[in-house]
Amino acid sequence: MDKELNQQYKRLVVKFGTGLVTGGSDHLNPEIMSGLVAQVAKLHEQGREIIVVSSGAIAAGRHCLELPRRRKVGGIPYKQVLAAVGQNRLMNFYDSLFSQHDITVAQALLAKADLSDRAGYLNARNTLLALLELRVLPIVNENDVVAVDEIKEARFGDNDNLSAMVANLVDADLLLILSDIAGLYTADPHHHPEARLIPQVAKIDAGIEKLAAGTTSSLAIGGMVTKIEAARLATASGIAVVVADGREPEVILRLAGGEAVGTLFLPAASKLESRKRWMLSGLCTKGRLVVDSGAATALKKRQGSLLAAGIKQVSGRFEQGDIVNISDAEGTRLGCGMTNYSSADIEVIKGAHSGEIATLLGYDYGSEVVHRNNLVLL
Ligand code: GLU
């Protein structure tokens, strides 16, 4: 990371994984956490705006209750109970550590459902921005108590994706994902001693995703896969991302000071406007359009509008004005957009030429199913 780039890093989101805050043990590690907090405090003193996304609630709750792993209590998924016990313990830790640096912290527990409508998204955004303005340091976690574990779509599920969502929400300049793995490697370093760390990724393509899928981390929930998902969302919104080992001495300060540590994912786009970042977050998508290869190329290469002729398949139920995902026939997500037609309409007009829409439906909202102005590509 060069110095010039680093000058732009005014607003940072820093994510601490469970493996990091526990030091790989079964409880929160005060020494490690105090080292991380001291670094964040220094950045805060430099006038930067920082939001911490911290895991560790479930680990803290499990340790406190001394209960075995993977069990349900009264039918409620165990993790939700553990999070309820552990979250305030986690916050107490942070509160006392940050108060040693005269920094006031705030707890923000986010649930996916709260952010999926535009008003909820904007409320969460405004609260976090107001806290930053007051120089209060927000500490974010998923609201595991209300997030229903069984329904994957209803939760972020891992704090890597949550941290990207938060970075997207507040329009951060840099997202640091710190865990117990040094970054993205050319092969799984646990099994291939010759594996090399990749210092910089310009674009997250299928090759990068494949590398991530082959890398394991003993402690992280999603390992490298969720980190790449997070990096993809954040970089598409115009945010730089670093995945690094949080146990490296002074790693946060070194990164903020322009040193290259871990893997830097370069922003794919210039900063997107708020409405487009919200669309891209995937929080609000109601369905999916699968397009043929011609349409996929037109979208990617020419940033054209999506026409009915290029649509092969439609899934989900949505109305005109809803946000839908767009993917190619192989299932790769290309982006998302606001649709001019409902799912029922698209079922009828998919594959048809624009001139046929009026005959097929009896009305016509224009030849574009998704107009290029309402399209956000990954
Ligand atoms: N929200 C969970 C916790 O606080 C962690 C999820 C994750 O580590 O990705 O324990």
Image (tube, rainbow, N blue to C red):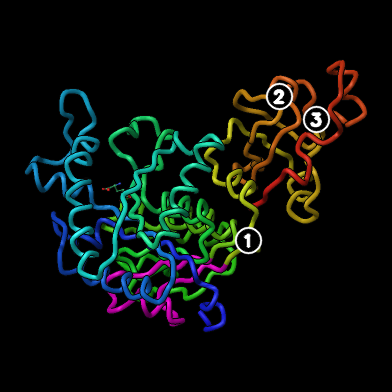
Nearer to the camera, 350 or 174: 174
User: Where 239 sits versus 70, above or below?
Assistant: below
Residue at the location (49% across, 48% down)?
A: 125
**Quadrant of the rendered image containing residue 284:** top right
Crowding at mark 3 (Cα within 10 Å: few <14, some 14-19, many 20+)? some
Q: What element carries label 2?
A: loop
Question: Can you tell which of label 2 and label 1 is closer to the viewer?
Answer: 1
Does residue 191 show up? no
| Residue that label 3 marks | 351
Disc 3: residue Cβ within 8 A of ligand 1's nearest atom = no
**In the image, 272: left or right of 149?**
right
Magenta span of residues: 240-266
Q: What element carries label 3?
A: loop
Q: Earlier in the sequence, mark 1 or mark 3?
A: 1
**Residue 342 falls within the magenta-colored stretch:** no
**Distance from the alpha carbon under mark 2 to that under mark 1:** 30 Å
| Residue that label 2 marks | 342
Crowding at mark 2 (Cα within 10 Å: few <14, some 14-19, many 20+)? some
Amino acid type at circle 3 is Gly
Task: Tell which residue pokes out farthest to the left in this image.
Answer: 66
Q: Earlier in the sequence, mark 2 or mark 1?
A: 1
**Quadrant of the rendered image containing residue 12:** bottom left
Q: Earlier in the sequence, mark 3 or mark 2?
A: 2
**Distance from the alpha carbon under mark 1 to that under mark 3:** 34 Å
| Residue that label 1 marks | 271
Q: Position of residue 59 (x, y in %)?
A: 19, 49
Question: Can you tell which of label 3 and label 2 is closer to the viewer?
Answer: 2
Amino acid type at circle 2 is Ser
**Residue 263 falls within the magenta-colored stretch:** yes
Question: Can you tell which of label 1 and label 3 is closer to the viewer?
Answer: 1
Crowding at mark 1 (Cα within 10 Å: few <14, some 14-19, many 20+)? some
